Every structure is written in structure tokens, then in C-alpha cells.
Image (cartoon, helix red, strand yellow):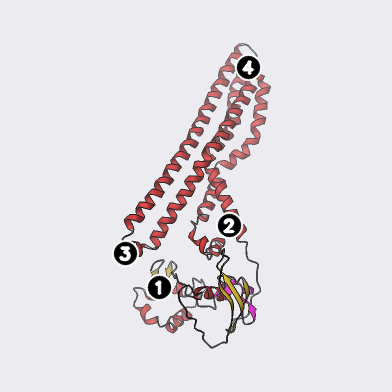
Amino acid sequence: MTAVLRRSVVPHERARPNSAARDLETVRQLLSGPAPFALFDMPWSPIFIAVIFIFHPVLGWIAVAGTVELISLAVLNQIRSRGPGAEAQQATNEAENLGEQMRQNAEAVQGLGMRSAGLSRWNVLRQQALGRQILANDRTGSYTSSSKALRFYLQSLMLATGAFLVLAQDISPEMMIAGSIILGRALAPIEQAIGQWSLGQRALSGWRALKELLEKTPPEIDKTALPAPKGFVEVQGVTVAAPGENVPVLRSITFKVEPGTALGVIGPSGAGKTTLAKILTGVWRPAAGKVGIDGAAIDQWPEDELGGFLGYPPQEIGLMSGTVSDNIARMSEQRDDAEVINAAKRAGAHELLLTLPQGYDTQIGAGD
């Protein structure tokens, strides 16, 4: 989740569907399901087949033929269901992303008469996702059913052949029964693997996506805690381009701000005011130059520690699920109520907050 949050400050990354939590859950489902047990049991299959060979070579070759057929079904399952499965996942992500965008912009959607058009587009994406999911499930289900039917057929064939060999006095009746039971144990892990194939493919895709996310966003190194800043800000020759872009938004910006003074920046839309704010708060990193606070480069500060000394209202501001006090205290578990009230008073919001149903303890959330 830390990596997701850090990547989301990049504009084009924030616009992409975020499936990291779903990918992680899919991997968890695979690892906590029967698939790992099938992998642990599978190395025993050759041993079981070898025991059947000891009973009689004919029974052993039946077991080998059945194993080869099941493995062939698994390979065909992989080839035929891989494409529809990936397409279904992509279409599901697109539909969920559009639905979330509509929910976040519900006022504009409703006020501008976009609801019908938006729902129509969402419905098309959803139907495409369902259609591809049905196709992928049908293909996987057909191979799962085929593998189960094949296993029953092979066990019946093993019993029939064993009965013939018993009548010919080549094996004992006990070997006939044992051969059928052992064959079922030898083929069960392969059948289980085929049954979990669809989940395994989704988990593998999710694992790769998580791997790519974490490789792009390595964990931050621990940084030495610095003293509370006094407010001396110095920007030296800063050039800024949006993350992932090559065209600079700001070029060679240099200025100083002394503690206790204020600096106003004005300009038309797109001039780079928001970009400058993101650089000063460490949300973005400059392509060239240095941003310093009290003489220390901004990247020398631990992010959470520095953020506690800054006030930053972004263009797209939102509230977190919790109380008014929680949001004022920036969701800190060790908040000081006196400091929360003092902050509200300094912002001129104390009297307004007291008029809320539960005052500072009123529950709020996204969109409030």
C-alpha cells in the first residue's frame, strides 16, 4: 500500500486502474487454497506409479498413460484459457475504474446529465468483462470436468484390468483393489492442479503486477531525524518536469523565503503554481537544482516527519474516513485534543465545527 500511495503522485499512474489490493488477495487465495497441497503431493505420484508397476507392468502402463493424458489436459488448459483470462481481468479493471471515476465525480455526472451515457459505457465494459470471464471459466471448467471423468474412467479401467489379471492368477485380489486406490492418489494432485488453474493464472498475473510495482517503487531508506524546521526555505536553480514526462514545467527557479515572511505566487492556469507547491512539499522531486529547508535538502527529511510541519491543500482535496478531529490531526493515533482545537481556532473554523451534530467527533469521509 505504501508503494501504491507513492506511485499515485505520478499523474498517469493515478489515472490507471489500481488492482494491487485485488492482486494481493488473489495470491493469498491461491496460497491458502488446495493448490500448494497439490504441489506437495505431486512428487509422490511417480512413487505411487512405481508401486503399481511392482503389482503388474500392465497396471503400471495404464497409470502412466493416465498421467500423460492428465498432463496433456493441463497443458491444453493453459494454452486455451490464458488469453480469455487475461482479457477478462483487463476488462474488469477498466469497468471498475470507470465506475469509481463516476462515483468520485457524482455531482458533475448528475449535474451535467452524464449519468445515462456514463452508465451505458460502464455497462458495455462490464458486459465485455463478464463475457470474457464466462469464456475463461467455461474453458477451465470443461478441462476440470474432463480430468475428473478421465480419473474415474482410469480407476474403472484399473479395476477391470486387475480383475482380468486376478482371474488369470497373475495378481492377488488385494493388489487389484490397492492398484485402483493408489492410482487415485497418484492422479489426484494433477486433477487438483487443473481445477486451480484459473486461480493460478490470475495469481501469477497479480504476482507479476505486484513485482513490477515494488521494483518501480523500492522502499525508502531510513533517514536521520532532523530538528524541527524554523522555516528558512531556499530554492536553487530548480527545473521540474512531471513524473514520467520530459518537458519541463518550471525552469531554473531560484528564490529564498525567510522565517516569519510570506511569499505569494500568481499566474495563469498551467503556469506551474501547483507544480512549485508539489516541489516545496516533496511530493515531486526536481529534475535539476535543489530545494532546501533550514539548509538541508528536502530529500534528506523523512517524508512523514517533514509533512507534519507543512500545510498543503492540493487542488483535489479530500477527507479521510474518521472524525473531524482525526482529519485535523492528520489521522495520528497520538493526537493532542488541545492542539486540534487550537488549530481549528487559528483557521477560524472552531465555531463552525461546534455546530456539527457531534462537534469535533462528527464522522466524515470521502466526499463530505
Callout in the foreground (3, 4): 3
Which amino acid does the dot numbered 2 rest on? Leu
The residue segment tinted magenta is 292-308
Q: Which residue is mark 4?
A: 172
Secondary element type, mark 2: helix
Secondary element type, mark 1: helix
Earlier in the chain: of badge 2 and badge 4, it is: 4
Left or right placement of residue 309 versus residue 269 in this view: right
> Can residue 352 be spotted in the picture?
yes
On whether residue 307 falls in the magenta region, the answer is yes
Residue 251 or residue 23, whichever sits in front: 251
Q: Which mark is residue 111?
A: 3
Quadrant of the drawing holding the C terminus: bottom left
The residue sitting at 60% across, 58% down in the picture is: 214
Query: Which quadrant of the view contains residue 162?
Result: top right
Relative to residue 301, is residue 258 depicted above or below? Answer: below
**Residue 345 locus on image (x, y percent):** 42, 83
Q: Which residue is mark 1?
A: 361
Mark 1–mark 2 distance (CA, rounded to whole Å): 37 Å
Earlier in the chain: of badge 3 and badge 4, it is: 3
Earlier in the chain: of badge 4 and badge 1, it is: 4
> Can residue 32 be spotted in the picture?
no
**Residue 246 locus on image (x, y percent):** 58, 65
Q: Which mark is residue 6?
A: none
